[in-house]
Amino acid sequence: MNWIVKLTAQILSVGGIAGVIGIIITGTICARYFAHGPEEIPQILTYSLTTIIGFYFGSKAENKPMVVGSDGQPVA
């Protein structure tokens, strides 16, 4: 039982609950694809996966403050 707790803690520390949900939805989509073909994947699963992946990577993105030059234009 101790290994289950360690494994769960390690998985949650890497991606949090969004990562776990993403893995579950990805696994469900893959299982349905291989069992029934691409026509049998509900669009709600596809939309959920793209939303969760977008949120996950969006939350990992670095927020840099925009630097503005003397002319008021952003500096790269």
Image: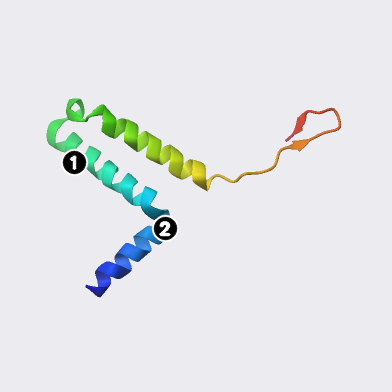
Residue 28 position (above or below residue 9): above
The answer to whether the residue labelled 2 contacts the one labelled 1, judged by CB atoms less than 8 Å apart, is: no
**Tag 1: Cα neighbours inside 10 Å, few (<14), some, or many (≥20)?**
few
Q: Which scheme is used to colour this image of the protein?
A: rainbow
Mark 1: amino acid: Ala
In the picture, residue 4 is in which quadrant? bottom left
Percent across and percent down for residue 35 are 13, 37
Percent across and percent down for residue 57 are 47, 43
Identify the residue at horizontal 21%, vertical 28% (top origin). 38
Element assignment for label 2: helix
Quadrant the C terminus occupies: top right
> Label 1 belongs to which residue?
31
46 and 39: which is toward the camera: 46
Horizontal side, residue 72 vs residue 38: left or right: right
Element assignment for label 1: helix
> Label 2 belongs to which residue?
14
Q: Name, please, the residue furthest toward the left.
A: 35
Identify the residue at horizontal 17%, vertical 28% (top origin). 40
Identify the residue at horizontal 33%, vertical 31% (top origin). 47
Percent across and percent down for residue 71 are 85, 27
